[in-house]
Image (spheres, rainbow, N blue to C red):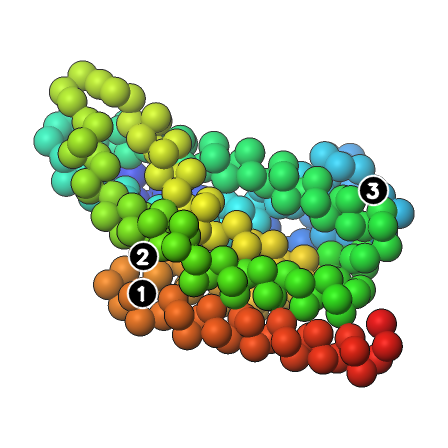
Amino acid sequence: MTGRAVFWPLFFAAVLAAWAALWAMAAEPRALAVAGIDWAALCRTGAGGTAFPALLAMWAVMAAAMMAPAAAPALAAWADLPPPAGGAGGMAALAGGYLAVWAAAAAGFAAVQWGLGRAGLVASDGRSLSPWLTAGLFLTAGAWQVSGLRAACLRRCRSPFALMLARWRPGGPAPFGIGLRLGRDCLACCWALMLLAAAGGMASLIWMGLATVLVVAEKLPIGRHLTRPLGAALVAAGLVAGGVALGAGA
């Protein structure tokens, strides 16, 4: 049995499980109240500052649900390498390195949201309570979307096979290390879009789904036609939010 046949069903099952957990947290948090753990805290972070581990767990699940699909093209490229690198074990190690970067990033995102909650800038479900914060998030994401540094990282994300050919040798280095490099480039591309979750809150599954589609599409050939229009749309949304803030005297 090939690595693809073993790996892909498990990979997509894990992605679906992460999305199911997000849906459950957003739709009915009490459904997850098992094993004596208050899982409702995963999507209802109090503005006064609730347990950081619960917030970290929520961000880790969200990062896995949104960013694991973006690794699919790189994993498919790795599977085309000669055995044994292209086997299920190598693909799992590559995915592990990639997701390790996003797990570390989840801690940073959780810390940001926790701090904003303590400052009274986000609601208990993660929604922005400040139109200025919302405007700043959209403007930051739009500016980063069209920046030269992001473009360089995105080029590497779109051509993972070049990195693999440059780094892979029979017997080493470990695919986990290559996964770390791929995850680093992906984080550099997508961190601003992930922070926009703070504007819509944990309950905004529509935004999370749309962001996931955009992140995956940008890594495909069609993505070259999406980058600048998306950046313009984000800047426009930021300007609208800023106008709302000015009009409300916030």
Task: Point out residue 30 in the picture as x, y percentages from the top left corner.
Answer: 76, 52
For the residues labelled 2 and 3, say whether their Cβ atoms are less than 8 Å apart: no
For the residues labelled 1 and 2, say whether their Cβ atoms are less than 8 Å apart: yes
- Amino acid marked by disc 2: Lys
Residue that mark 1 sits on: 223
Distance of label 1 from label 2 (alpha carbons):
6 Å
Q: State the image quarter where residue 214 is shown.
A: bottom left
From the viewer's perspective, is 118 left or right of 23?
right
In the rendered image, the residue lying farthest to the front is: 148
Foreground of the two, 192 or 63: 192
In the rendered image, the residue lying farthest to the right is: 48
In the rendered image, the residue lying farthest to the left is: 82
- Amino acid marked by disc 1: Gly
Q: Nearer the viewer, mark 1 or mark 3?
A: 1
Task: Point out residue 236 in the picture as x, y percentages from the top left corner.
Answer: 56, 77
Counting residues from the start of the chain, the first of labels 1 and 3 encountered is 3
Q: Residue at the location (63% across, 39% down)? A: 108
| Quarter of the picture holding the C terminus | bottom right
Distance of label 1 from label 3 (alpha carbons):
39 Å
Query: Which numbered tag is attached to residue 50?
Result: 3
Task: Point out residue 241 in the picture as x, y percentages from the top left corner.
Answer: 69, 75
Q: State the image quarter where residue 90 is shown.
A: top left
For the residues labelled 1 and 3, say whether their Cβ atoms are less than 8 Å apart: no
